[in-house]
Amino acid sequence: AVIGRAGAMAAAAMVVAGGGDFSDLREIKKQLLNVAERSRERGLQHSGKWAAELAFALEPLPLNELPPPPELTEEDARDLDAYTLAKSYFDLKEYDRAAYFLQGCKSQKAYFLYMYSRYLSGEKKKDDETVDSLGPLEKGQVKNEALRELRVELSKKHKAQELDGFGLYLYGVVLRKLDLVKEAIDVFVEAAHVLPLHWGAWLELCNLITDKEMLKFLSLPDTWMKEFFLAHIYTELQLIEEALQKYQSLIDAGFSKSTYIISQIAVAYHNIRDIDKALSIFNELRKQDPYRIENMDTFSNLLYVRSMKPELSYLAHNLCEIDKYRVETCCVIGNYYSLRSQHEKAALYFQRALKLNPRYLGAWTLMGHEYMEMKNTSAAIQAYRHAIEVNKRDYRAWYGLGQTYEILKMPFYCLYYYRRAHQLRPNDSRMLVALGECYEKLNQLVEAKKCYWRAYAVGDVEKMALVKLAKLHEQLNESEQAAQCYIKYIQDIYSCGEVVEHLEVSTAFRYLAQYYFKCKLWDEASACAQKCCAFNDTREEGKALLRQILQLRNQGETSSTDVPAPFFLPASLSANNTPTRRVSPLNLSSVTP
Amino acid sequence: MASVHESLYFNPMLTNGVVHANVFGVRDWVTPHKMALLVLLSELGRAGPQLGLLERRRLNRLLLPLLQGPDMALSRLRKAIEECCPQLAGSVHIRLKLMAEGELKDMEQFFDDLSDSFSGTEPEVHKTSVVGLFLRHMILAYNKLSFSQVYKLYTALQQYFHKDEKKDGADENEMELTNPEELDGKMEKEELDGPLREEEIACSGPLSQKQAEYFLSQQASLLKNDETKALAPASLQKELNNLLKFNPDFAEAHYLSYLNSLRVQDVFSSTHSLLHYFDRLILTGAESKSNGDEGYGRSLRYAALNLAALHCRFGHYQQAELALQEAIRIAQESNDHVCLQHCLSWLYILEQKIFDSCVLLEHSVNKSLHFGLPYLASLGIQSLVQQRAFAGKAANKLMDALKDSDLLHWKHSLSELIDISIAQKTAIWRLYGRSTMALQQAQTLLSMNSLEAVNVGVQQNNTESFAVVLCHLAELHAEQGYFAAASEILKHLKERFPPNSQHAQLWMLFDQKIQFERAMNDGRYHVADSLVAGITALNSIEGVYRKAIVLKAQNQMSEAHKLLQKLLIHCQKIKNTEMVIRVLLSIAELYWRSSCHTIALPVLLQALALAREYSLQYLASETVLNLAFSQLILGIPEQALNILHMAIEPVLAHGAVLDKGCAMFLVAKCQVASAASYTPQKKIEALESAILNLNEAKTYFAKVDCKEQLRDVLYFQARLFHTLGKTQERNKCAMLFRQLHQELPAHGVPLINAFK
């Protein structure tokens, strides 16, 4: 065992490259290949896959630099037969059989496989038993019986410091399954220190860390793997800016071909709703890795949002051909049907996804959306609640619940849910606009104004906050502020460069024309009125106003002859383009439980 | 008193005073514990005829809780049976042992035999009896098991049995398993904790649906009736979380968790639980019925209503109003009159926080009667009576109304409302200043056998009415100088309503008020001053009033006056007549202390008029005493004596001991003063009667330990004896006076000028 420990230390010693040091890509590649091999030997396929994918992205090594196969120790040799037999049983998913033949093996590799197959056998039995438990309440009670024994044995080894990186990882997994989160985090951190190359340990850490504060207090090994970890966890914690930065620097360091990184970046863009960028990256990814199924659900979400029916249809058929019994495939097909407004079928596919993996969070939420479309509010509530049960931080589910209650005409009731969603995504304008609308319905105009302003300040996605704010000001007879809001709104629309037919633009111009007319600013008023004439619904009004202005002008003296540039064009107004009020904390008077 | 009703409206599942639990489909399954029970039943059937009557009765009493309760360890079950009938316990154990150590076919055989008990011409068990139902449930559940499940059940039985064996025998093996440094920490500990907490879930196993329901309803009713007996908030929450982990769809658990969070005043988790409950309830409602009247539309309305209740409970009145509006709107849209009535009552409560609105309430009462909601109607009537009492409506009408609603309560057996009604009567009598009547009502409630006690066996004793009555009782005792008794009552209150519970503020306030009075009587003003802060925290108006009194006692007249004026304006605004009169009295006292009796008179007359109008008799008499005193000082003692006759009777009948003493003292003073113009013979008579009155006053003052007043009385008496030439008595009084005078610091206020 001592030798095994030393071996692990040696492996750790291989990784000397600190924090962001990617200068020696060859060394990194060697390490990756090494760890991929070692993971595979232990049946840790996902970690192996990750390392291999990353290694693939780097330049191939010449023959003389290929890492030698891991050396065998005396113990390894002794256990070799048992290990070889057990590994083949393990690969055939006969875990109990594998464990039986590995009993008494001393080498690290065999010991790990022994413990791991016992763990997996427990998990498999658990899944099987869930189907025929004795009663409904017992369902949650079914647990992996092996866990406690494993924990006892592993903790003995842990105390004696006989566990290598993989062993620590397994110990951590066992602890996590027993809901001993704190201990699990400690063990995973230790595992990352002993064997930083093992991606599995990092990934488990990602799942256990719930906020930025927790992250700060972790003492992580200072290796290049940490960069991947940080990037990943920033994405998880919705700290997209930081995540994108990290990924960019990784790409710059030479991982530009890594499909993993590309997909992560795409997901990150998806999270901040930068749809175009995300779409283009996903398309790129599909080109590089056409048979990839992972993350394709996210891709389909994007296609859905953009209503790109043919692309979505192509994707769905393509994935269905590759493997139709994958969660992601079902999800894509669900999205496809949803886009075609066949909501029953969509719900069916989401249900299938959940059958394949009950912990697949996205499907619950999406199913909720489908039920909403079908106006089956109670089923929608159920689905959303399930989603929240799986992950309390799923803001879409909270938001969906809020929407459901809003449809049921309970604006006060849904405030709670929107607030929840807002807490999880403080900088998402959609929640703020929703909150604002609720407050408006409740006639709490002050709060509503705060929400709209905030929504505008954090970057409004749907560009509706300002119009709503303006209308509120209009209602409250605060014409000055209303006009300002409309001006900003028009600037926003024009600076976007999009010539999207915006319904409210005409309203804005009409109001502004009348406002300037009242203020007797004839030039501005006539400019606005002329703009009004460009829209169908305000044409007549605009013409009438123009006539009036002309009349009044003729009565008065002629004003200055030089015609200033229209104020609403972005160029002329770049000077005062910044919001006049700074973003203040959203201090809603109501209690926010 | 004001919050009596509030707390009752808080019960959301409550319609007409009945708590409706959501009725689940009866789902049950076989567990080893249940099998042990089955064995017990079959043994009982076999050995039944040989058992003695007493043993059989004991066993029968044992059965029901066993059938309903949670699973327990075999050792506990055996102990329970042994207590009833040792012989039977032995045979049950042997049968189980045979089954557990035998083969699978033994268990199969056992279940095959079970159904025999129904057959035959004279079956041992009736099919529809409690035991029969249980047996049939079990047989059905067993028959439904799949092959692997049957085997699992059998191994579970073996484990169940062997665990017990091991515990009995040498614990060596067990120790080895648990020993390695509390590795099996959590789980094992929970199991160990189990047997210590007697009534609770002792077994680590999951609860069946039935058992969970039983647990929830038991805890909920304990929370409602006797909070101290329910599980502590933390452990209850733990149990609930456990329950929810096994079955997240168990909506009722969320509701109980909401109630539990309310206990500890946790806004966040209570809101969370409440909304979660209704989200879940909407599901179950939707399954059974469609969107119609009874479907989830109904729970939506009540969801909004409950949210309003929650916000009201935490004092977020604006939020509460918004939620209530929502509830009303939805209820109106779906024509749910019952829900609307609930909303209306709530609306009243909310409006009450802002302004009084009888109209709403009257409306609510009428409508509730119309829709056959006696509970709501009675609550409305009671609120109305309370409100009218403050508004000074005729007492006889109020009492009539209460009597009528009492009739309703008895008719519908609404014991909760009966309690409230009595508590309210106590409070109203106190308000009117009839302490004997109040005392009688309080005692009635306390010695009455609750209806619930007959029905369920749970004494309702942590409702607000009990708190109110006990507090009044304590104060009444303190007024009569029985401080030991008062503190005894307060001690009891502390036990019954622990400091963090909902109604604890009531006794806290009364406790401090009583202490304050005592401190004032003893002249320990600094102590009284320190109590003011506590009183203010619980009741700001009362606190300010007390502060003024302390200032007055400390001779800081101008500060006291300023404070009192402010308070007066505020109380007039919120129409707190009782306090207005008390403040007026204090102001008048300030005036005559500064020898401005002429200014005091109109103030006193104003107070008198108010007191008469609102039939606050006791305050009226007190005002009359003040008035008489002023007249005495103004030199018209005859007039003073005349009006004193009006006041003296109620004071002696209902007053606090201190007031009685003051009154008698005042009478004596007036007698002496008016005697000046009498003939010598008559004068001596008058003085002698004055001495008698002073004696009476002395006994009263002695009772409450008012040394200052006692000293004054002694001085006065000595002077009178001197005038009458009774030297011996005079010397005795003088000696007593001297003793007291040395004890007490000299007082600045001249003797004759002090009335209190």
Image (cartoon, coloured by chain):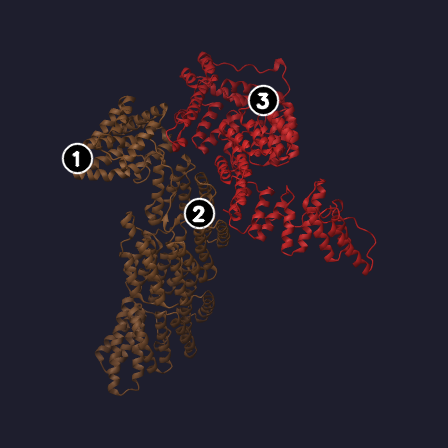
Chain colours: A red, B brown
- Give the percent coordinates (x, y) of residue B694: 27, 75
Q: In which quarter of the image is the N terminus of chain B?
A: bottom left
Number of numbered discs overlaid on the protein picture: 3
Which quadrant holds residue B186?
A: top left
Callout 2, which amino acid?
A: Asp
Inspect this view and state whether residue B281 appears. Answer: yes
Mark 2 secondary-structure assignment:
loop
Q: Which chain carries label 2?
A: B
Residue matched to label 2 = B266
**Quick one: label 3, few (<14), some, or many (20+) residues within 10 Å?**
few
Answer whether labels 1 and 3 touch (C-beta < 8 Å): no
* Front position in the image: B276 or A52: B276
User: Closer to the camera: disc 2 or disc 1?
Assistant: 1
Answer whether labels 3 and 2 touch (C-beta < 8 Å): no
Which quadrant holds residue A316?
A: top right
Residue matched to label 3 = A321
Mark 1 secondary-structure assignment:
loop
Mark 3 secondary-structure assignment:
helix
Which quadrant holds residue B93?
A: top left
